[in-house]
């Protein structure tokens, strides 16, 4: 059976946590960014060699053009370069991939959009480059050739484009193929941007048939389902073939669905960190942060708390730290308090020393954004205008927001503004849990908040 996007995000997120994840990017990702599809790219060449109608085998079309077209191979490569060189700006999907904490990004795309989005990554485009992969630095592996990133567009590695190029690949690129085979056998690979109309799908099919495994959580792919009813039966047979070889398939109707999927994956693969926001009088906040701190003692020690040192954040941090210290479970790196060096806007902390203080020169808006970029969820307790700003920044970044509505003020206003329960951790929040956040019984509201936090933090369900 196919899987849904929530399952795909969960399985791949677990592989990222374990340090065994790789990504394989196909043409669909670039197509979603406005680049031409394979048929758009090669279709115009058919007329130049007198081939009419639709040509299904595009690598074979490229082969015929190389053999019979005006200008042969140089003209073919110039055509590809001239079309693709117009696209130099990464799309949101490329920028999201650059945020993923993975060290291997494979692609069959010729364009340089991934490199532009991740300038810190090294690029392996030649077969000998495979010798330097795995030295601890993130690498974008351009297994089918690459155009240059800077300056005039030139081929830094020739394209794999004709039928002969594909058939001879293992002989012409032995190191690259051996590395891909090793990654396929030892990692969980997510194939994005492929359809069965894409000639590069053969890479996945060949790997699946040769090195197929029945491991339930081995590899993943998001495949576009055909629109034409005539192609659905063949598509379903091919999907079943992949599933029998240990590849989970998530079907999408359009490549535009890849960007929301990448948003969910990016959030899922952030550190297990909860940002606590809110303000109010101690008498108003204390009943809430006392109950929350007790509940948080039962959560995984890998979870971290982050705040800007405000009353709610400090209240939860200090109380939880006290409880953990009393039971010899306290570690300072579990608590991060971000402080501006000019603390005019900050609430002074107490004399108690808990957690790790991180000082910064960033303006408040920049600081909030940089902290939330590394959080999975935001919890709002009471709160004022600053809490509203933090909620807005969190939503812009795909960070799940849990407003403890029963505490009132900003938390209640945020809860009231949601006409339907939002997604938390990439899954819809249970309506009853969402309603209970506003329950007048504090115990009920805190229990609901912890259930929502568990989901937003992607805690495995028991």
Image: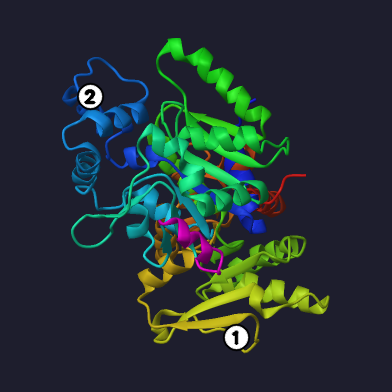
Q: Residue furthest right?
A: 327
Q: x%, y% of residue 128?
A: 47, 60
Residue 350's mark? 1
- Nearer to us of marks 2 and 1 is 2
Left/right of residue 321 with respect to residue 405 in the rendered view: right
Left/right of residue 266 with respect to residue 245 in the rendered view: left
Q: Nearer the viewer, residue 261 or 438?
A: 261
Q: Is residue 130 magenta?
A: yes
Considering only order in the chain, which callout, 1 or 2, is on the residue closer to the N terminus? 2
Residue 43's mark? none
Residue 46's mark? 2
Q: Quadrant of the N terminus?
A: top right
Q: x%, y% of residue 337?
A: 55, 77
Where 16 sits versus 246, above or below?
below
Specify the segment rendered in magenta.
125-137
Q: Residue at x 51, y 20 (%)?
A: 235
């Amino acid at each position: 059976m196919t899987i849904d996007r929530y399952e795909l995000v969960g399985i791949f997120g677990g592989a990222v946590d374990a340090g065994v994840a790789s990504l394989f990017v196909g043409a669909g990702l670039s197509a979603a960014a406005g680049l031409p599809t394979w048929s758009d790219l090669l279709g115009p060449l058919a007329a130049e060699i007198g081939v009419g109608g639709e040509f299904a085998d595009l690598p074979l079309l490229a082969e015929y053009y190389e053999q019979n077209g005006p200008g042969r191979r140089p003209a073919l490569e110039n055509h590809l370069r001239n079309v693709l060189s117009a696209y130099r700006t990464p799309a949101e999907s490329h920028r999201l991939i650059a945020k993923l904490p993975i060290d291997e990004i494979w692609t069959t795309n010729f364009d340089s959009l991934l490199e532009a989005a991740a300038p810190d990554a090294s690029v392996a485009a030649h077969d000998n480059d495979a010798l330097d992969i795995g030295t601890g630095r993130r690498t974008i592996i351009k297994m089918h050739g690459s155009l240059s990133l800077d300056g005039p567009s030139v081929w830094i590695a020739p394209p794999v484009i004709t039928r002969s190029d594909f058939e001879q690949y293992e002989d012409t690129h032995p190191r690259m193929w051996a590395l891909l085979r090793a990654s396929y056998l030892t990692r969980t690979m997510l194939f994005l941007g492929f359809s069965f109309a894409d000639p590069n799908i053969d890479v996945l099919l060949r790997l699946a048939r040769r090195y197929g495994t029945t491991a339930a959580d081995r590899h993943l792919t998001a495949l576009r389902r055909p629109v034409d009813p005539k192609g659905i039966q063949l598509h379903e047979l091919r999907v079943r073939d992949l599933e029998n070889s240990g590849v989970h398939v998530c079907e999408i109707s359009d490549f535009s669905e890849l960007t929301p999927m990448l948003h969910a994956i990016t959030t899922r693969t952030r550190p297990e960190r909860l940002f606590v926001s809110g303000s109010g009088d101690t008498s108003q906040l204390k009943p809430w942060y006392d109950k929350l701190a007790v509940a948080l003692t039962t959560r995984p020690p890998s979870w971290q708390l982050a705040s800007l040192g405000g009353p709610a954040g400090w209240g939860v941090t200090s109380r939880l730290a006290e409880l953990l210290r009393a039971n010899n479970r306290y570690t300072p790196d579990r608590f991060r308090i971000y402080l501006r060096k000019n603390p005019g806007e900050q609430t002074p902390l107490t004399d108690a020393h808990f957690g790790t203080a991180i000082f910064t020169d960033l303006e408040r808006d920049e600081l909030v954004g940089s902290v939330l970029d590394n959080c999975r969820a935001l919890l709002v307790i009471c709160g004022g205008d600053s809490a509203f700003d933090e909620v807005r920044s969190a939503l812009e970044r795909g960070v799940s927001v849990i407003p403890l509505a029963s505490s009132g003020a900003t938390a209640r206003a945020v809860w009231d503004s949601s006409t339907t329960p939002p997604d938390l951790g990439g899954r819809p929040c249970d309506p009853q849990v969402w309603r209970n956040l506003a329950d007048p019984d504090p115990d009920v509201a805190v229990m609901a908040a912890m259930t929502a936090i568990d989901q937003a933090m992607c805690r495995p369900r028991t």
